[in-house]
Amino acid sequence: MRLGRVASPDGVAFVSVEGDGDATVVREIAEHPFGTPTFTGRSWPLADVRLLAPILASKVICIGKNYAAHAEEMGGPAPADPVIFMKPNTSIVGPNAPIILPPSSSQVDYEGELAIVIGRPCKDVPAAKAHEVILGYTVANDVTARDQQRHDGQWTRSKGYDTFCPLGPWIETSLDPSDLEIVTELDGQIRQRSRTSLLLHDIPKLIEWVTTVMTLLPGDVILTGTPEGIGPMQAGQNLSVTIEGIGTLTNPVAAKR
């Protein structure tokens, strides 16, 4: 199932996204998408609604340097254990929403990533049971003010600006995430291309590691790390991240007015 969140003629709603191409429709879900969704009976063509970020997360947990080639391009060794940091939920935006460049930064980079969406409250989850707490997977962009990351020595400011966590276009609930192609394009030019099979710490390990630290709630998001090829974006450009089996997340880049 593809789960989304839309602004429809009747307001904001969670939906099931069904069909392909021009025949795609969205069916409104009653209340929330967790557990077994029930439907209101209302539906719209996808072209008649606006896709929003597919989930409302209480927190976004990110994994740093989780591809060996990316760790190398950042100038350090691959970490023996997952490196976790957080982005505020106010950084989340949906498909086609602009990434706003803060005037205080001279280098804002893209980082295409696979994101995990949590389906139920969980703590201290063993890796073998990680699949039981996952709602599904979506596409993410861990936007980063790289100059501020270097200056501050820690990552909160550089990764926490509003619009610095695009998510979408929807959540795919029926997916094997172990070997998916991930491609990032800037104005149609490929800048990142890798596969999730190259993650240093796989998804069960990440869930086990994070849940030893904190309780995860339904809708919480874990960004699994970016491959090599990160680089800067400029106002007026368009950034797209495509993950095999999910879809494409596209966002324009704009200067703050």
Image (cartoon, rainbow, N blue to C red):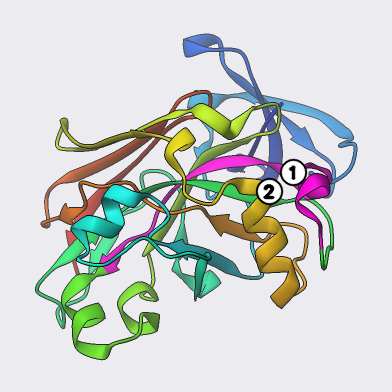
Amino acid tagged 2: Pro
Residue at position x 62%, y 57% from top?
Answer: 206
Whether residue 210 sits left or right of residue 49 in the image: it is right
Instruction: Tell me the CA gap for discs 2 and 1.
Output: 14 Å
Using the image, tell me which numbered label, if any, was put on residue 204: 2
Tell me where residue 4 appears, x and y as whole percent: 63, 39
Using the image as rendered, state which of residue 112 and residue 25 is in the foreground: 112
Look at mark 1 in the image and give the residue it sits on.
135
Label located before the other in sequence (2 or 1):
1
Q: Is residue 130 magenta?
A: yes
**Front-most of 39 and 144?**
144
Magenta highlight on residue 3: no
The residue lying at 34 percent from left, 50 percent from top is 68
- Above or below residue 44? Residue 114 is below
Q: Which residues are magenta?
A: 125-144
Residue 189 falls left or right of residue 46: left
Q: On the image, which quarter does residue 176 sit in?
A: top right
Is any atom of residue 151 visible in this view?
yes
